[in-house]
Amino acid sequence: MALTVGRAAGRWGFLLPGPCPAAAPLRRPARLPAACERRYSSRGKEKTDMSTYPVESIRNFSIIAHVDHGKSTLADRLLEITGTISKTDRNKQVLDKLQVERERGITVKAQTASLFYNHEGINYLLNLIDTPGHVDFSYEVSRSLSACQGVILVVDANEGIQAQTVANFYLAFEAQLSIIPVINKIDLKNADPERVEKQIEKLFDIPTDECIRISAKQGTNVETVLQKVIEKIPPPQCNTADPLKALVFDSTFDHYRGVIANVALFGGEIAKGHKIMSAHTKKRYEVNEVGILTPNEQPTHKLYAGQVGYLIAGMKEVTEAQIGDTLFLYKQPVEPLPGFKSAKPMVFAGMYPVDQTEYNNLKSALERLTLNDSSVTVHRDSSLALGAGWRLGFLGLLHMEVFNQRLEQEYNMSVILTAPTVPYKAILSSAKLTKEHGKDQITIINPAQFPDKLSVSEYLEPTVLGTIVTPHEYIGKIITLCQDRRAVQKDMLYIDENRVMLKYLFPLNEIVVDFYDALKSLSSGYASFDYEDAGYQSADLIKMDILLNGNPVEELATIIHSDKAYAAGKLLCERLKETIPRQLFEIAIQAAIGKKIIARETLKAYRKNVVAKCYGGDITRRMKLLKRQAEGKRLMRKIGNVEVPRDAFIRVLKREPDK
């Protein structure tokens, strides 16, 4: 009996006893895990020689636009034209790799791809970065622009200029980048490119003849965009002879290879085996692999100045690849690059594991996800009802929802998220508190830390400058909505005869939960909204406590403007009445500001019908039985303790639109 390898060995080529007429050679398994598949394929490829692309023939550019104006579709066509990916019907948002991006149809993470293109007999290397369009991910856009020398500004021929188009234009304008305006979706029935060209000229002062009309879906005129990129965008200003200077502008975590850092080289060259050092952590590493993204990883021999690619250097800890860090050769220190303005969180929420035994797993999942999304801030926190957890800072509500969805999908973690709050400030008047905190101004991200009014001279709330672009027929409704949210009008400009741009100064806590949804429903989905930080302003803030039978529930305390306190307190009491299970004694649910009760709901007790056995007879007999029952309930209420179950907390804290 012979030991053979072949078809008898089954799918994985195991050794099985038994005769086999013709032993087939060992074959590669039919399917490998995704991470192994990438490594297997990258080793087999011939490495590209990047030295054939001098600095003069490199162009680094981003695609920026409002949500759903066709950035990712244009990126697909550019990848097809340059032969980076083969033309198939399945090429839809190729660069949107995350499951959450596929499901929501939006770009969340900026993605890089290197394209090779021959123009007038010269081979060019074009490094493209596809960026998100939603206001919550503008930090991704500003990071991407730091690695570029120009941008393609995409505007929908049907919808025209929207709020985020304006915000992204000014990001690129302030970074002094070359801007190529592109009008997309000219194949649509209601497309009006002439109107959009006039809007671009009026708002951005770009001549109409510089606009390129394309249809990214059908590929119409897309080749012209590539030619304009080569003609209008300058090559990067750097030199291969200079010492190595690499900016880390993004990073991801791979379970097999550790941290993969996306870098833009501003000088020198880097290859496998080089000893490099981080300007931030001062740690030394040896480079294991360098390469470009096409959009999948493709190893190369070296990366040179002006090029954008990735490197793997055995960074095992997620904290080692700080975004904005500068890498340089060991013993050849350089002046670190300016890096990025750290993202400023606009919304805070508590995050707790559903089961406390999952705390450590959730901790490592958070560390890995915050490496990939560095705009999230994390602080340890704990709660009597929900256990140990974290207080997380996000750039907006969609950012918070996407982060939570990624935790569930990529790390299989289910969590409890508390109601979102914004960071307030208090100017202290008490010398004792000033000494205790070491400063006269404190930031409050948790209502439990809200100082008493007697020790504070002034409370401050964060404000934002909001830009609304809307068709003119909805102006009246939108102005009313903004006034309800305590907003102050700053500007009003007609972009053309049909569209108006409004600028308002909003308190951040008024727009953070459901303003965007209300705006969309009022304007039948036509209005767009964008905001930027506008500092702090003085406000009449108060802390509202929720009491159950006179005992405060810390997790349900909120900081709110005094004008809105009554409505919010009533709503919260009503919601608690629906979710807390009834007891054998009466429960008083109250909203209080200091000692003053502003709203109350009563949860009636379960009652046994003690007078059921009385058939007729004197009324005093009935009254005696009812009085005895009432005394028993009163005693029970004194010694009874109301425990709010966890699922009731979750239902109350879940964000719901105002009823």
Image (cartoon, helix red, strand yellow):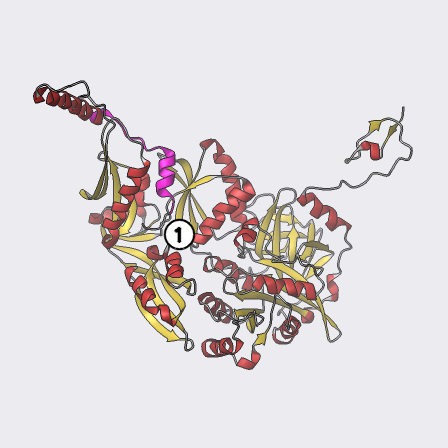
Q: Is residue 644 magenta?
A: yes
* Location of the N terminus (image quadrant): top right
Q: Residue at x 56, y 81 (%)?
A: 209
Q: Is residue 226 magenta?
A: no
| Residue 510 seen | yes
Q: Position of residue 586 (x, y in %)?
A: 22, 31
Tag 1 residue: 347
Amino acid type at image mark 1: Val
* Residue 162 horizontal side relative to residue 631, left or right: right
Q: Give 160 or 427, whichever is nearer the viewer.
A: 160
Q: Which secondary structure, mark 1?
A: strand
Residue at the front extreme of this rendering:
616
Q: Residue at x 83, y 32 (%)?
A: 8
Q: Residue at x 50, y 59 (%)?
A: 340
Q: Position of residue 159 (x, y in %)?
A: 48, 69
The residue range painted magenta reads: 638-655
Q: Residue at x 40, y 54 (%)?
A: 346
Seen in the picture, residue 146 relative to 228 is either above or below; the reply is above
Seen in the picture, residue 218 relative to 590 is either above or below; the reply is below
| Residue 306 seen | no
